[in-house]
Image: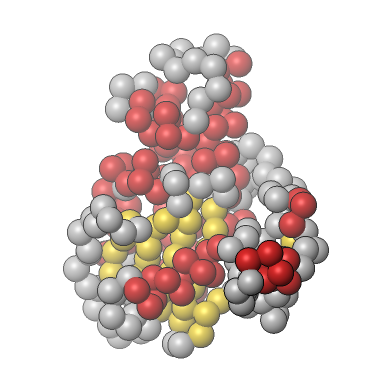
Amino acid sequence: MVPGCCSADLRRSISTDGIVPFLDGCDLADIIEKRVGIRARVDNDVRAHTIGELRNGGWGQPRSLLVITLGTGVGLGWHVDGRLYPPPDHGAQGGHIAVSWTGGNPCYCGAQGCLDGLASGTAMEAAAAERLRRLVPSGLKGRVTAEQLCAAAPTDAMARGRLDRAIEALRAGLHTYHHILFPDLVVFGGGLARGLWPYLGEVRKWFVKTRRYDGRKNRKIEERIWTRPLILGRH
């Protein structure tokens, strides 16, 4: 599994968007097969996560499954009516939809106000570092991680502000995803998901009540399952 997009035959990493530059244009499947002696396929990490949830997540057969990974960036994979998206060589970047035109640090994609630039762990850490440089009061010092921000948010106003900004960006992104994909199930994964989860109660309630336009009623929200990726809810 690699970030970015891969060739249609799942043999080669085309681009990792600078995240793992030595893998850009790498015939990774050939290298693995020669070194390890087993058949290999190369695929985007979130696409692989989506396949795993569909086959082994225990969610039945949702018509539309959406997987959002929160970590270094914001990744997106979805499975609708028997088809997995985005295609391996498509290069779709669902984490870079615009959720704000005026807020957020500039993103590596060249835009400002995209979901990745507001709700990823990297974006939260950059925003915290900028505020600490301006001596905004906080009990946090030095290089602050997204996990530290999540842990400190109940008692630290600066940390809570970074979380609130990320959560509102995530809500805006989910609103767009909802009206495009009508997901029956949304799964959060990635290292940041667990840290944000205790603060997503209002977003979960809002998501379940969001109106559908395909004639189906919203279903009861799923309880949190610690041993699996985190579930936002079912429609």
Is any atom of residue 33 visible in this view?
Answer: yes
Q: Which quadrant of the figure contains the N terminus?
A: bottom right
Left or right: where 88 falls relative to 213: right
Give the position of the C terminus as an image quadrant.
Answer: bottom left
Q: Position of residue 229 (x, y in %)?
A: 35, 58
Q: How is the image coloured?
A: secondary structure
**Point 42% across, 71% down: residue:** 52
Residue drawn at (62%, 41%) of the image: 102
Residue at left offset 69%, top offset 49%:
19
Residue 103, above or below 201: above
Q: Residue furthest bottom?
A: 82
Is 150 in front, or is 173? Answer: 150
Residue 231, given in percent of the width and then of the height, sits at 31, 60
Residue 228 placed where, x, y %?
A: 31, 59
Number of marks in picture: 0
Q: Quadrant for residue 233, please give it.
A: bottom left
Q: Nearer the viewer, residue 189 or 154?
A: 189
- From the viewer's perspective, is residue 200 above or below residue 49? above
Examine the rendering and report whether any part of residue 97 can be seen. no
**Residue at x-position 34% and y-position 74%:** 56
The answer to whether residue 51 is above or below residue 82 is: above
Q: In x, y percent, where is residue 37? A: 63, 72
Can you say whether 152 is above or below 75 in the image? above
The quarter holding residue 211 reads: bottom left
Residue located farthest toward the right when viewing the structure as drawn: 25
